[in-house]
């Protein structure tokens, strides 16, 4: 879901013809160049053989894509719901709001749990980032950012720092202490700098590296201490809206989704896309790995959530109903992986049986669209954030 588009046209000397023109960013072997449109079109035809054209190459690419789909189909021996027929149905399902966190003055856009299973960080359109005690609902820290629309926030694995960013195009890291009257703004460290808004961020398995996604169509891996760019990931054709790190301790992959309707799996060591899925019909707002790391789910503006099996290299389930016409903004799995929680723009949270593909519950409480949702590390509760300015703890 991209509610606003922020586009800046850059004028300057083209790196190829040196004329002053409107420029486009082009990456060649991970190196950035600024070329004018005429030079981009010229370079696109430079390597063509005799009797070749861009149209013929596009046709060949489509043909190869078709053959790839045929090979995927050969591995498709059974449907997930057929396997699930042997599994017992879930019993009565009851969850309700246990805590309501009030303090933001505008739409809550993102939240994350601390590994201690007690603290939560949230960010909002009011320009504030708040650290909460989910048990007592007290605010432990608050930071006012230099911009509104703080679209991303994350807790460090140690619980000793938070990261956040948004329309300032930066990812900033704040160390957390429990000193009274501490000036957190003075301890801010600007780690990442994109050329468009920051849409998502996530620490890797240590406090020393952080992944970011941006409206500039890229993801990037940064060193927190030095602010150095360690790896960049290019492949999305539009704004990247979400990312999620593989759940293993040595996980070197992550998945991203964006406005180009693609979900892409990346190797963090090489910067290469190793798998790509394009079955959604609109923006992908959220992606989340299955607890085992062998699959991931996505939520989209096309009003569906989908499950992709990485080993089979294909989509294996769609979670939707005709009565659901609003987009899914956020998804997450229960600790066992049997349930999929999905927040929607119609103010509800739907709970899906992952194996059987059926909806087992609808949770009501928010008074505006649900924008973010995360299950706690121990699986005993989950937290949702909404445009109604509140967060709710469900269990």
Image: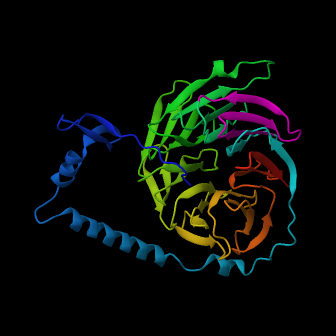
The reply to whether residue 338 is visible in this rendering is no
Provide residue 368's location: percent of width, then percent of height: 72, 55
User: Which residue does the image show at 64% across and 76% down from the upper left?
Assistant: 80
Quadrant (top left, top right, bottom left, bottom right) of the N terminus: bottom right
User: Which residue does the image show at 52% across and 24% down from the upper left?
Assistant: 226
Residue at the extreme left of the image, as rendered: 50
Which residues lie in the magenta part?
A: 119-146
Provide residue 10's location: percent of width, then percent of height: 33, 37
User: Which residue does the image show at 28% across and 40% down from the upper left?
Assistant: 22
Q: Does 166 sit above or below residue 4?
A: above
Residue 333 painted magenta: no
Which of the 4 image quadrants contains residue 291? bottom right
- The colour scheme applied to this rendered structure is rainbow
Q: Left or right: where does residue 16 sit relative to residue 369? A: left
Provide residue 257's location: percent of width, then percent of height: 53, 54
Which of the 4 image quadrants contains residue 49? bottom left
Provide residue 27's location: percent of width, then percent of height: 33, 43
Q: Left or right: where does residue 242 sit relative to residue 71? A: right
Dominant secondary structure, magenta: strand
The residue nearer to you, when weighing 367 against 197, is: 367
Q: Does 327 sit above or below residue 97?
A: below
The residue nearer to you, when weighing 138 against 107, is: 107
Q: Left or right: where does residue 134 sit relative to residue 128? A: right
Q: Does 17 sit above or below residue 381?
A: above
Quadrant (top left, top right, bottom left, bottom right) of the C terminus: bottom right
The reply to whether residue 46 is visible in this rendering is yes
The total number of labels drawn is 0
User: Which residue does the image show at 50% across and 43% down from the upper left?
Assistant: 214
Residue 126 painted magenta: yes
């Amino acid at each position: 879901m991209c509610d606003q588009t922020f586009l800046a046209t850059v004028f300057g000397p083209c790196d190829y013809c040196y004329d002053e023109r409107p420029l486009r960013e082009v990456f060649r072997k991970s190196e950035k160049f600024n070329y004018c449109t005429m030079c981009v079109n010229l370079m696109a035809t430079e390597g063509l053989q005799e009797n070749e054209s861009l149209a013929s190459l596009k046709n060949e690419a489509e043909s190869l894509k078709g053959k790839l789909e045929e090979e995927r189909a050969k591995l498709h021996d059974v449907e997930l719901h057929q396997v699930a027929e042997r599994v017992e149905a879930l019993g009565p399902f009851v969850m309700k709001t246990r805590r309501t966190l009030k303090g933001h003055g505008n739409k809550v856009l993102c939240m994350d749990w601390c590994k201690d299973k007690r603290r939560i960080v949230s960010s909002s359109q009011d320009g504030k980032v708040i650290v909460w005690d989910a048990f007592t609902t007290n605010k432990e820290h608050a930071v006012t950012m230099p911009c509104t629309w703080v679209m991303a926030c994350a807790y460090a694995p140690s619980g000793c720092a938070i990261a956040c960013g948004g329309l300032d195009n930066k990812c900033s890291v704040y160390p957390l202490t429990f000193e009274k009257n501490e000036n957190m703004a003075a301890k801010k460290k600007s780690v990442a700098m994109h050329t468009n808004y920051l849409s998502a961020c996530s620490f890797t398995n240590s406090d020393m590296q952080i992944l970011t996604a941006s409206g500039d169509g890229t993801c990037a891996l940064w060193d927190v201490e030095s602010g150095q760019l360690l790896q960049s990931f290019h492949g999305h054709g539009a704004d990247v809206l979400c990312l999620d790190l593989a759940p293993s301790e040595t996980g070197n992959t992550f998945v991203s989704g964006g406005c180009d309707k693609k979900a892409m799996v990346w190797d963090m060591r090489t910067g290469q896309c190793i798998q790509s899925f394009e079955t959604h019909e609109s923006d992908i707002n959220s992606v989340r790995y299955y607890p085992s790391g062998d699959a991931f789910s996505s939520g989209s503006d096309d009003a569906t959530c989908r499950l992709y099996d990485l080993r089979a290299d294909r989509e294996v389930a769609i979670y939707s109903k005709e009565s659901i016409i609003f987009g899914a903004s956020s998804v997450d799995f229960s600790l066992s992986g049997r349930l999929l929680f999905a927040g929607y723009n119609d103010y509800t949270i739907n709970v899906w049986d992952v194996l059987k593909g059926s909806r087992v519950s609808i949770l009501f409480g928010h008074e505006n669209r649900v924008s973010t949702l995360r299950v706690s590390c121990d699986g005993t509760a989950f937290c949702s954030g909404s445009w109604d300015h509140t967060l709710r703890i469900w269990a």
